[in-house]
Image (spheres, rainbow, N blue to C red):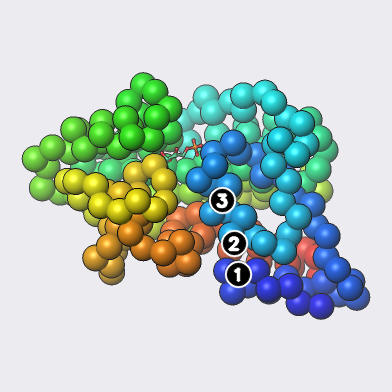
């Protein structure tokens, strides 16, 4: 049986009639959960709320890998189910890679709009507007730890455009496009985004594991 995940990737399940794979997503970020759900529709994706996990997951480290692992491990220790966590952010070479792992609280608050405005202020008058999003997924699958990475290159606008997406999307134009991530459809964003790339790599891995 093939299960079509709307990333274009198929999940094959040997002799199963139905594939009821349970996978916990270790995030409370609504924008991220919505995007990942759109890409993993045929998998039974459990939220932290579904499993009754109410603690604040720690993100104390300096790399996406370490933060993703910390989040996934905290939830795995709590429920013992297969779980994945994504740590992501926007990196600006002119700012030495900032905000990077601090993207979610760059302005000192966890407010998306305040963070975006802080980035625009720090880039005020800067000609080199290159930026890239990066996502690292840590998957704990049957107790084993695996990492999947995706990046998406682009440039930063000086003013916001569009209402879709979340976070820094209204000022990020992916390479090869003229519209921002907040103006492009969710389908296009998922097809080219850092998170879409990392999720597809994870889906391919899970597919291989399921089929032995
Ligand atoms: P964390 O992975 O929960 O630590 O936070 C990721 C942060 O990076 C988000 O809160 C956003 O500020 C930013 N970010 C990551 N991916 C995206 C994206 O696809 N669009 C816009 N902002 C993003």
Q: Quadrant of the N terminus?
A: bottom right
Residue 142 is left or right of residue 6, and the answer is right
Q: Secondary structure at mark 3?
A: helix
Q: Is residue 148 above or below residue 55?
A: below
**Residues at marks 3 and 1 touching, judged by CB atoms closer than 8 Å:** no
Q: Which residue is mark 3?
A: 34
Q: Which residue is mark 1?
A: 6
Q: Nearer the viewer, residue 137 or 170?
A: 170
**Is the C-beta separation of discs 2 and 1 under 8 Å?**
yes
Crowd rating for badge 3 (residues with CA inside 10 Å; few <14, some 14–19, many 20+): few
Helix, strand or loop for disc 2: helix
Q: Is mark 2 within 8 Å of ligand 1?
A: no
According to the picture, the residue beneath numbered tag 2 turns out to be 39
171 with respect to 15 (left or right): left
Residue 117: horizontal and vertical position, in percent?
25, 34
The C terminus: image quadrant: bottom right
Residue 73's x, y, as percent? 70, 34
Expressed as whole percent of the image width and height from the top left, the position of residue 146 reads 66, 50
The relative height of residue 204 versus residue 118 in the rendered view (above or below) is below
> Nearer the viewer's eye, disc 3 or disc 2?
3
User: How far separated are the C-alphas under marks 3 and 1?
Assistant: 13 Å
Q: Looking at the image, which residue is at 24% across and 65% down?
A: 178
Between the residue at mark 3 and the residue at mark 2, the CA separation in whole angstroms equals: 9 Å
On the rendered structure, is 100 left or right of 61? left
How far apart are the alpha carbons under marks 2 and 1?
5 Å
């Amino acid at each position: 049986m093939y299960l079509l995940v709307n990333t274009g990737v198929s999940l094959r399940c040997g002799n199963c009639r139905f594939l009821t794979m349970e996978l916990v997503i270790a995030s409370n970020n609504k924008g991220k959960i919505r995007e990942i759900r759109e890409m993993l529709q045929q998998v039974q994706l459990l939220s932290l709320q579904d499993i009754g996990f109410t603690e604040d997951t720690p993100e104390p480290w300096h790399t996406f890998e370490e933060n993703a692992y910390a989040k996934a491990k905290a939830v795995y220790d709590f429920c013992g189910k297969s779980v994945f966590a994504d740590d992501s952010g926007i990196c600006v070479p002119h700012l030495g890679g900032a905000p990077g792992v601090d993207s979610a609280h760059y302005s000192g608050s966890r407010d998306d709009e305040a963070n975006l405005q802080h980035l625009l202020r720090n880039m005020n008058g800067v000609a080199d507007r290159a930026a890239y999003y990066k996502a690292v997924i840590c998957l704990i699958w049957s107790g084993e730890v695996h990492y999947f990475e995706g990046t998406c290159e682009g440039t930063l606008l000086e003013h916001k455009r569009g209402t879709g997406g979340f976070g820094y999307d209204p000022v990020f134009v992916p390479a090869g496009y003229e519209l921002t991530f907040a103006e492009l459809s969710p389908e296009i964003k998922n097809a080219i985004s850092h998170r879409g790339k990392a999720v597809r790599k994870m889906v391919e891995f899970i597919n291989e594991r399921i089929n032995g």
